Each structure stands twice: as C-alpha cells, then as structure tokens.
Image (spheres, coloured by chain):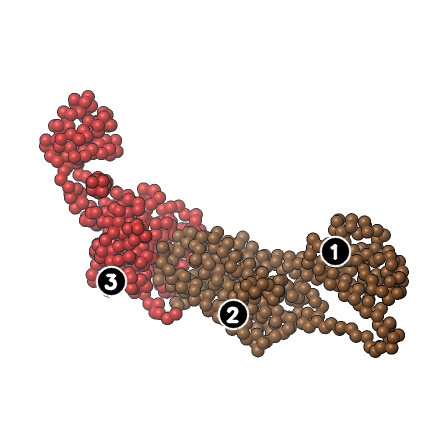
Chain colours: A red, B brown
Amino acid sequence: MPLERTQESGVRSQNRGPAVHLDKLVKRFGDFVAVDNVSIDVAQGEIFGFLGPNGAGKSTTIRILCGLLAPTSGSATVGGFDVSTQPEDIKKNIGYMSQKFSLYDDLTVQENIEFFGGIYGVSDEKLPERRDYVLKMAGLEGKRSALTRELSGGWKQRLALGCAILHEPPILFLDEPTSGVDPIARRNFWHLIYELSGAGHTVFVTTHYMDEAEYCHRVALMYGGRVIALGSPAELKTSLGAGHLLNLESSNLLGAMAALENKPGILDVAVFGGGLHVKVDDPGAAIPAIYKILQDAGIHVMTLDSITPSMEDVFVGLIEKEEEKKAA
Amino acid sequence: MNLRRTRAIFRKEMLHIIRDPRSLVAALLQPLIMLMLFGWALSLDVDHIPAYVYDQSNSPQSRDLINAFQGSRYFSVTEVTSYHAIEQAIDKRQCLMGVAIPPDFAKQLGQKQPTQVQLLLDGSDSNTASIARGYAESIVALYSGQLQAPVQTAMGNSPARVSAEMRVWYNPDLLSQNFIVPGLIAVIVMIIASNLGALTIAREWENGTMEQLLSTPARPSEVAFGKLFAYFVVGFVDMVIALVVGVFVFHVPLKGSVLLLLVSSCLFLFGSLALGILVSASFRTQLLAYQMGSFISFLPAFLLSGFIYSISNMPRVIQFIALFVPARYYMNIARGIFLKGLGVRALWFELLLMVFYCVSVCYFTTRKLRQKVA
C-alpha cells in the first residue's frame, strides 16, 4: 500500500470551474434505469436542490458523485476530479450525509467528532478548534459526552452535518438531511446550510419537502431518473407553462371540483389545503365564468384570487404532465 | 496506508468493544468454558471401565485371569453369579463390559486345548467399547502367553519370553488433556476470531455507517487493519487465557519456546480475524455472516484439523479438503511446541503457511472492502 501525504487539501478547491459537473450521466441496475442521461452544472457556493419523489434517482446520483457507485456511462466531476478515475481525491474534498442517520450510536458526541476528524485527516493541533466549532454549530456544547443514541432526531442531524464538515470540504452532499425531523429543527438545519453556503461551501441537497426547495438557489426536479426541470424557484414558478393559478375557497370543495373539471378555459383543478387551486389560461375571462358555474351549482364562493404558484404546484404540475406523456 | 486514519478506526472499534460489555464478557468467557468442557469433560482416556465377571469355572486358572483384569487400571471388576446379572447391568449402564468364563475353562486349559472367554460389550458407546475391547484382548493375550511360556520351556524350546515392550513418546502418560488442550487453543482462536470478525463489517452495513465510511478518504486497508488490530487485542487476551489455563490448570507440559508459540499463535489469530472480516464484508448481514463464519472457520477447525479426529483415518476426499484447513497446520505447531519442544527448524513449513495465510486473507479482505456500495 503506497504511503500518501496526510496534508489537508484546504477549504477551497483549486478548481475554477463548476463545483459539480454531470455530463450525460447514466446508471442502470439491470434493466432499471435509475439515472437517465442527466447533465447538470452546480456553481461554487451554490445551494443546489435536488427534488423528486422517492425512487426518482436522487440518492443514486448523489452516491455516484460521492464515489460510492460507479456510473454506467457518461461522466461527472466533483471539485474538478473525475468520479470514475479520481474517487480518492473527491473523498477528501466532500462531506456526505447519507439518507439514513449514520453516526455511531454507541459513541459519544465528542467521540464521533474525533473519529471523523481522524478519518478526514484533521490534524491533532486543529481538531480541538474544529471540534468546538462543530459542537457550537450543532448546539451540542452541553452534550459532548452524551451517547449519540440518546440524542433527539434534530440533534443527530446537526451532529451528522457537523461531522461531515470537520475537514472544511468545499462541497457538501446532503441526502434528505431533514427527513423525519420536526419543523423547528428543519428550519434550524436550513439556517446552518445558509451559513455554510455563505462561507463558500457548495451544498448539493436532496429533499422531497417542497417548502425546502424554496430555500435553494437553484433546483433540479428529477422524475423517473431524468431531470424534467432545472432553474431557480422563481424561474420554475413562472415557467409553469401557459396558465395562471387561482385559489378558490368555497362552501363545497368536492362539489366545486366536480363542477369545474373539464369546463372550457379551465386547465386543471387540484385540492390544495382547504381549498382548490384552479389553473386557467385567461384569468380575466375565467373568474366570471367560475362564479357563474358555481352559482348554477348552488355553491357559495368565499374567495377567488389570482396567486403565485408554490413549488408544490410546480412539482405536481410538471409530474402530471410527465404522467400524461407516459400515458399517451 | 495512512496511520492516522488506521488509528482512528482502531480507537473507534475499541470504543465499540468497551461499550458492549456483554459481548466482551462472552468473548472472554467462551475460551474458559470451552477449556473446562473439553479439558475435563471430554476425556478420551478410558480407565476404570466397570466390568462384570461371571466366573463359571471357579478354578485357580480362572482366578488368575480375573486377577489380571483386576490388576490393570483400565478395569474395575465386579464378580457376579449369572449371565442375567451382566445383561441387567449393561441395560442399566452399570457396566460397560461383561466377561464370562466358561465352566470347562480349567479343564480345557489342563488338556492344552484352545479355549475361549466371552466378552460382552455395550456397543451403544462404541468408542469406549472398542477401546475396552482392545484392553481386554491384550489382557487375555498376555495371560495366554504366560500360560504357553512355561509349556515351551518344559518342551525344551528357547526359554526366552518374547514380549512387546511399549514406549510412548511425547505424551508418556497418554493423557488426552495433553493432546486436547494445545489443539483446543487453535479451536478457540478460530471461534473467537470468526465471531468477532464476522459481525464487525456486517454491523456497519446494517446500520448504514459503512456507506458513510466509504464516502470518507478512509481506504479499505485502513478500515480492515484498524478493525483487525482492535479485535486482535481481544483475541490475544483470549489466547493468553487459554495458554495460561492449559499450562497451570491442566498442567500440559510446555516443552518448547514460549516466544515461538506466541508468535505463531499471533499469526494464526491475525489471519483468522481477517478471515472473519472477509466473511463479514461478503455477506453484509450479521446473521448470515455469523453463520457463514462458523461454517467456514469453526467447523473445519473442529472436525478437519486433527483436533480430535485423526485426519489419516478420513476418506481421501475429506483428507484432500483438510489440506486447506489452516487450523490443522497451527495445531501441528501448537502440539509440536507444547509436547515435543519443536523449534523453527522442524516447524518452518507450518510457520511459512501461517504467514501465507495472513497475507493472502488480508489481501482478499482489502479487495472485498474496495467494492462499491451496490
């Protein structure tokens, strides 16, 4: 086994190009195509969200980028290093948080930090400083000698993130970091991600929480192994296609839905919270028409306004379009 | 291989070991229990076999034969007065062998006619029975030889009494403990090593920590050796316990070099731990890895190593398979050093095989760990 230098490669990679670059990446498991011809560039310092339902290929893509899986074809670079030929270099420049909580339950908070510090090659002189930083960041200063299994979900998540950034990696891969964590902890966690991004880390994060997508600089929507939309949240909302979104609250939700479906000028009706989101091509003509239809049906309209679509509308809209394509 | 990372893995594994006191105690008690069981309970020595004698002849000649049985330490003789008593005693497992001397025993001998003594054996314990038969036959043969000798002298033939004199080397008392305990050390090392090693990687796969570990710069060799060194500490303690108990409790003579014994034992321990880790990395679930670990390490070490069952008595095919059982060569080393006081000059081949075992298993373990997630 060749000896190698233990020197840290520093926070910023020397690479001046994109932090992460995917070019026609394909991963097949037998007949199943998990990742289908994906090409993406992620800029340095960007928070890049990877959205999609379970099984869309998000985790597989992240695993390829972390050097855990070999791609079937296509290429990808992380921090300028090729995933197929330079996985060792990539591993020194990334922090990875897998979907499943993966610290050691029977070790204390401090022992986990010290273990990962050792594995990531943080020097003995630097480790106390990094350890204290991570403890502070995760809010675990008072819990350093608690066994990890005794921590709550949110703390575990922050500790896992802390362990992944001990070596100040330029690029972070977070695979559904907030799944199974309460809303407050989720918000705190995103706060940390912002801080890291502000400090120059590139953050590549997968999620299926649509509200989290709003926090990202850019998102890619993945479905069936393919990227079906890519852009900033604002761009995606405006590019939802022809049509405007109306929010309708009425005395009879299901009755209103049945009455409006397949009427001229109405593109789509979907339940959203306690009301309906109605997609129309021309709001000026559609709003009076809707009032009329519902009045005829004996349904009282409480509110009917034009709204900006949320990421969830974008997501549902795009996926429905995909499903129609598939059915056709 | 990076020492800092290997050390980090080593420390982490030591913490796992300390945090799981039940497994640790089990790992340390196991060799003691096995030593007690095999050292004391599994005695291959057969002596004081309860034997019932039905003497129908009641003659000086038959008394002589019974005395010959009584005089040997292999039998403890009870005299009965019917066949039925022997049958009953065998049924109730009160005796293992019956000896029936026919009524015409003395008469036949007086007429220099060949005569027979009936041996009844409890074949349900075939192992002891066949040993008892061997002893009984030799006592009878000795007796008949003594009868013939004076006859031959009277007839003017050579008066020399030819008798086979037996000398047992290396284990002069033929104590089975002396034979079993050094071999048992090999079995213990193999069990401990495969049990400890088999779980360690599989556990990380089950908990999802392996994926995390693979995403770090830690190399497969560093993971393997960090874990190996940690379990080596436990295995070494086990091995020393076994050696100390063997020498001081069972009084197995340690004739050869302690250093050589330790060095060769460490080689065997290291290779066996690596084998456990290889199994662990191959199966990825603790249950499967544990079962396979026992299957490929413990069973061969127990059955195909010459621990109890002599390899030379096995069918050809099994003998061939036994050639690939590392425990067998280590057993030669352990017994050779303990009982014969052999040194490097006599054991170089086995020692070389131990080195080869370590190196090759470590190579395959590292290679297996290099595989990707799926």
Residue A101: x percent and y percent?
38, 50
The residue that label 1 is drawn on is: B121
Mark 1 against mark 3, which lies toward the viewer?
1
Residue at 82% in and 77% down: B160
Residue B45: x percent and y percent?
70, 62
Between the residue at mark 2 and the residue at mark 3, the CA separation in whole angstroms equals: 45 Å
Mark identifier at residue B67: none
Please name the amino acid that badge 3 sits on: Gly
Please name the amino acid that badge 2 sits on: Met
Between the residue at mark 1 and the residue at mark 3, the CA separation in whole angstroms equals: 83 Å
Q: Do the dots labelled 1 and 2 sit on one chain?
A: yes
Please name the amino acid that badge 1 sits on: Leu
On the rendered structure, is B134 left or right of B373? right
Q: Do the dots labelled 2 and 3 sit on one chain?
A: no
Instruction: Specify the quadrant that holds the C terminus of chain B.
Output: bottom left
Mark identifier at residue B354: 2
Mark 1 against mark 2, which lies toward the viewer?
1
Foreground: B133 or B369? B133
Mark identifier at residue A80: 3
The crowding category of the residue bearing disc 3, from other C-alpha atoms within 10 Å (few below 14, some 14 to 19, many at least 20), is some
Helix, strand or loop under label 1 = strand
Residue B31: x percent and y percent?
59, 59
> Does residue B112 lie above or below A138 as drawn?
below
Question: Of marks 1 and 2, which one's residue comes earlier in the chain?
Answer: 1
> Does residue A173 lie above or below A214 as drawn?
below
Residue at 85% in and 74% down: B152
Foreground: B272 or A124? B272
Between the residue at mark 1 and the residue at mark 2, the CA separation in whole angstroms equals: 45 Å
Residue at 43% in and 49% down: A149
Helix, strand or loop under label 2 = helix
